[in-house]
Image: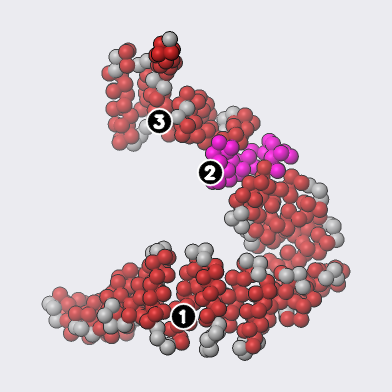
Amino acid sequence: MSLQLAEQFEANEQYEQAYEEYKKEHEQNPNDLGILERLGHLSLILEKTDEAAFYYYEILKRDVTNPLAYDQLISIYENTDKYKYYIYRGNKNSIEGKLDFAINDFKKALAQAGDDETQIVMTRLTLANLYRQTGNIPKAIDEFNLIIEHDNLNEDIFLQFADIYMNDGAYSSALDVLLRAKKKGFDSDRINEAIAAVYLKDGNAKKAVEYTKDELMKIQCMLELGEIEEAYNRLQALPDKYKNNAKYYTLQAQYYYSAKDYDKALACIEQYDKACPNSPLTYQMRALVYEDKNDEYNAHLNWGKYNILRKNIDIAVNEFLNAVQLKSDDINVLFTLADLLTESGETNHAAEYYERIAKLDPKNKEALRKLAAFREGLGDYGMQVNYLEKLHDADPKDLNTLKDLAKAYEKVKDKNSAIAVYNKYLALVKDPVDYKMAKDKLDKLESYGSADAEDSAGLIDKIMGFFNKTKM
């Protein structure tokens, strides 16, 4: 009854009474965003700005992307608290993907933070993460360096900072950050495990063992140190709970790889892939196994897939080029290479591989479609027609192909063929809008006289004749 009464009071502009009734309803339904919005709105009408800010903040706690709440909080704080004003404006810009604007807002918020350490740290931390998102790693590092000079931090800040260096392969810098965390009193398992991970990544397994309590990491260190059989025995003796961990399969694979039992290593990698689908590590491990097996083709393929996932497109292209030199009839690989070349802007080179696919599989619709589009882009409408005709043969009822083929015939001035294809299209199309468009085209073509329907060869003959006359 409170909600109906609140709405009635609000409709009658009895705002104070409506506000009190909505508060009662909020106590019963604290997560109802509609009620929170009404409370925020009525608080503003009643000039209860602190209460309004509270309710809009409560909305954001439940819906972090709520644009109304951001707009109202920005408006509330514009003339009363510049720090919060820029923070909320920056958060809104960040959520909307306007990262450069968000960075600018948080820099302005920082200037308004004064001596408040909590505000300074949180603002710089947000700036650091925004810089990471925009790929400006040096700026992110600068912010973290300033952050860790403060007190009252938490270990997550040091772990985030170390992670930046780890991703860049700057292991000594990552280690320095984590050791500074220990000096500041964060002698926790998380920090120690992170230190162990850095040492292991940097090839110092002996040092990593000193810091880790994780059984799987200890076994990995043993494998790295060449203690193969001891590592395997310890791996086999692990309780069943470890066998659901994806890392368990990587360690098994590493053991079998070290023992040169490549088939079992590959089987373990398959198990890992099921646990962590499409992980770069899967392809890296496979590539190493195939290299040891002297299987160059599969090694190149897996290094290629690894580099695709790592966004190293140029390296991936090179790996697939090497693979295709070894085996040139794998259509899936040719497609991957052609698509990578297209993504890199090398459309002419990509077309070569779509041509290879079309030769291997003359009815491959995707390759024919790509080739038709490529020729159209070059203005080579005759070859576009050629590929579209093959595509039509492969799938006579494909409406998009029929429409594209009819238009291509128009471009080469082949009126009769265009009319025939439009008639086929009209016999199949169901959408009334598409039907009308095609019918209008057909009627227009059929209304042309024969003088307007020269074929492309005749037109070229006339042009060449004109140039020959001018040379005489």
Q: Name the residue under label 1.
A: 122
Q: Distance between the residues labelled 2 and 3?
A: 27 Å
Percent across and percent down for residue 63 are: 38, 72
Q: Residue visible at 19% across and 83% down?
A: 46
| Callout 2 crowding tier (Cα within 10 Å): few <14, some 14–19, many ≥20 | few
**Circle number at residue 196:** none
The answer to which of 450 and 29 lies nearer the viewer is: 450
Where 241 falls versus 301 (above or below)? below
Q: Residue visible at 32% across and 16% down?
A: 452
Q: Do the residues labelled 2 and 1 touch (CB within 8 Å)?
A: no
- Please tell me whether mark 2 sits on a helix, a strand or a loop: loop
Q: Residue visible at 81% across and 50% down?
A: 293
Q: Mark 2 points at which residue?
A: 345
Q: What residue type is labelled 2?
A: Gly
Q: Is tag 2's residue or tag 3's residue first in the polypeptide sequence?
A: 2
Percent across and percent down for residue 224 are: 80, 68
Range of magenta residues: 322-350
